[in-house]
Image (spheres, grey):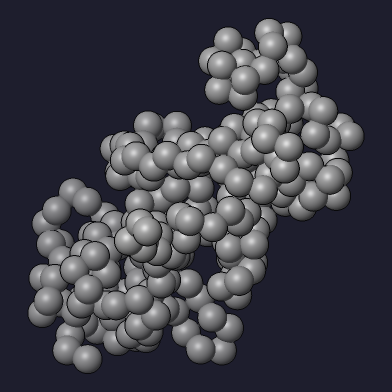
Amino acid sequence: MALLSQAVGKLDETSSLPLYQQLQRALRQAIESRVLGPDDALPAERDLADDFNVSRITVRKAIHGLVSEGMLVRRQGSGTFVRARVEKNFSKLTSFSEDMRARGRNPRSVWLRKAAGTVTPEEALTLRASPGTPVYRFHRIRFADDAPMALEYATILAACLPSVDAVESSLYAALERAGNRPVRALQRLRAVLFSAEQAELLKVREGDAGLLVERLGFLQDGRAAEFTQSYYRGDIYDFVAELSVAS
């Protein structure tokens, strides 16, 4: 591989921006411009230090930041690699946990909120529920291999779960155990820009592009049971759907 500095430029020692942040920006640029492609190995720390004329501590700090952002992943005994983008099939009703495990990734969540309440006027309209209908709300950060991937805000009719504590990790697994897993859904996708709060939770920059997916899930008997808003990182996710000519 050619020297990365030849592709993205040398660092500026006279800049007020710390060298490790300059190196992060250079590596980010190399990834976004596909100088480093998905699953490509990052040059060794020693080589990066020589290439950009910085210390290995600076290199290590820069790489650590990009690992935290989810752009790079460390593989034990192999090195550091550019994280491949995740393709989400928009036409299949699967959970985040199922998607990640199918790709050999380890899913987990950090809970922001688990609470019981009643539907808001907007939720009542969306879920086709009467005013005062009990619901459970689940707000969390979704991770894969310790990288933050999405923010998820789910509202579930309380009648579909035995309690708010019935959900430990996978919401759909808990709904399936209760016999109330949605069998079909309407999904809407639109582009968003992350707020300062969302950016901090997802380890991205304020104003970065994201993807908002709103899902309304229905039970076998046609009742709406789930309304979920998921904010996905635009730098990691691609949504795909198989289309066919209508007969």
Mark yes or no: residue 83 visible: yes
Q: Quadrant of the N terminus?
A: bottom left
Query: Which quadrant of the figure has residue 47?
Result: bottom left
Q: Is residue 7 left or right of residue 132?
A: left
As displayed, is residue 1 above or below residue 222? Answer: below
Q: State the residue in front, 100 or 129.
A: 129
User: Toward which corner of the image does residue 165 lie, by quadrant?
Assistant: top right
Identify the residue shown where x is 37% and y is 31%: 195
Q: Where residue 211 appears, x then y in whole percent?
A: 38, 45
- Quarter the C terminus occupies: bottom left
Residue 139: x %, y % from top left: 63, 35
Q: Nearer the viewer, residue 38 or 147?
A: 38
Q: Observer-nearest residue: 89 or 163?
A: 89
Q: Is residue 172 above or below residue 135?
A: below
Q: Give the residue drawn at x 44%, y 65%.
A: 86
In this rendering, does residue 202 appear at all?
Answer: no
Residue at the image position 20 percent from the left and 77 percent from the top: 35
Decide which of 108, 100 is in the foreground and name it.
100
Q: Quadrant of residue 225?
A: top right
On screen, residue 175 versus residue 9, left or right, reads right
Position of 123 relative to 173 (above/below): above
In this rendering, position of residue 41 left or right of residue 13: right
Q: Position of residue 132 (x, y in %)?
A: 73, 9
User: In the orientation shown, which residue stands out farthest toward the front?
Assistant: 247
Residue 135 percent location from the top left of the image: 74, 23
- 6 over 26 or under it: above or below: below
* Residue at 39% from the left image edge and 42% from the top image edge: 189
